[in-house]
Image (cartoon, rainbow, N blue to C red):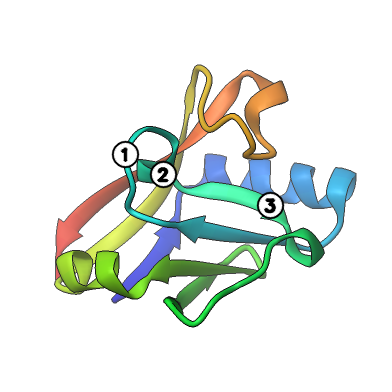
């Protein structure tokens, strides 16, 4: 699977890196907040045995649960930014925007 980001998403990632240091993304595949890509400080999120690295955007690793990967493995993920509130714990929330996944068939 391939993960890329729009220019808007890359700009936001850079802004968040300036504020918070090294970051990582995690896509768990759960409901509600878990269905959105979540951005965390790299040192504050523990990657587990059920997670895999699927790529990197803006020098930031992007992880997904193995179970969710089975559903998405035939897609190309495009990380974008839209106005509005996203995941409660994701770093972009205070910026008034949220990360969003768009996809195409690989």
Q: Nearer the viewer, mark 3 or mark 2?
A: 2
Locate residue 1 relative to residue 42 in the image: left or right. left
Q: SS at mark 2?
A: helix
Q: CA distance from mark 1 to mark 3?
A: 18 Å
Q: Mark 3 or mark 2: name the one nearer the start of the chain.
A: 2
Vertical position of residue 93 compared to residue 96: above or below: below
Does the CB distance between marks 1 and 3 fall below 8 Å? Answer: no
Does the CB distance between marks 3 and 2 fall below 8 Å? Answer: no
Does the CB distance between marks 2 and 1 fall below 8 Å? Answer: yes
- Residue at 19% x, 73% y: name it: 70
Q: Nearer the viewer, mark 1 or mark 3?
A: 1
Q: Mark 1 or mark 3: name the one nearer the start of the chain.
A: 1
Percent position (x, y) of residue 2?
A: 33, 73
Vertical position of residue 14 compared to residue 61: above or below: above
In the picture of the structure, the residue carrying the numbered disc 2 is 34
Q: SS at mark 1?
A: loop
In the picture of the structure, the residue carrying the numbered disc 1 is 31
Q: Residues within 10 Å of mark 1 (few under 14, many from 20)?
A: few
- Residue at 86% x, 57% y: name it: 21
In the picture of the structure, the residue carrying the numbered disc 3 is 40
Percent position (x, y) of residue 93?
A: 64, 27
Percent position (x, y) of residue 27?
A: 43, 56
Of residues 94 and 51, the one drawn nearer to the viewer in this rendering: 51
Of residues 14 and 99, the one drawn nearer to the viewer in this rendering: 99
Locate residue 20 relative to residue 73 in the image: left or right. right
Q: Quadrant of residue 11?
A: top right
Vertical position of residue 102 compared to residue 41: above or below: above
Q: CA distance from mark 2 to mark 1?
A: 5 Å
């Amino acid at each position: 699977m391939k993960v890329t980001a729009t220019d808007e998403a890359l700009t936001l990632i850079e802004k968040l890196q300036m504020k918070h240091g090294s970051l990582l993304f995690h896509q768990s595949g759960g409901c509600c907040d878990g269905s959105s890509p979540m951005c965390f400080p790299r040192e504050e999120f523990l990657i587990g045995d059920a997670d895999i690295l699927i790529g990197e955007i803006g020098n930031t690793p992007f992880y997904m649960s193995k179970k969710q990967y089975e559903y998405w493995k035939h897609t190309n993920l495009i990380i974008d930014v839209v106005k509005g509130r996203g995941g409660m714990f994701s770093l972009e929330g205070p910026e008034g925007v949220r990360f969003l996944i768009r996809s195409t068939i690989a």
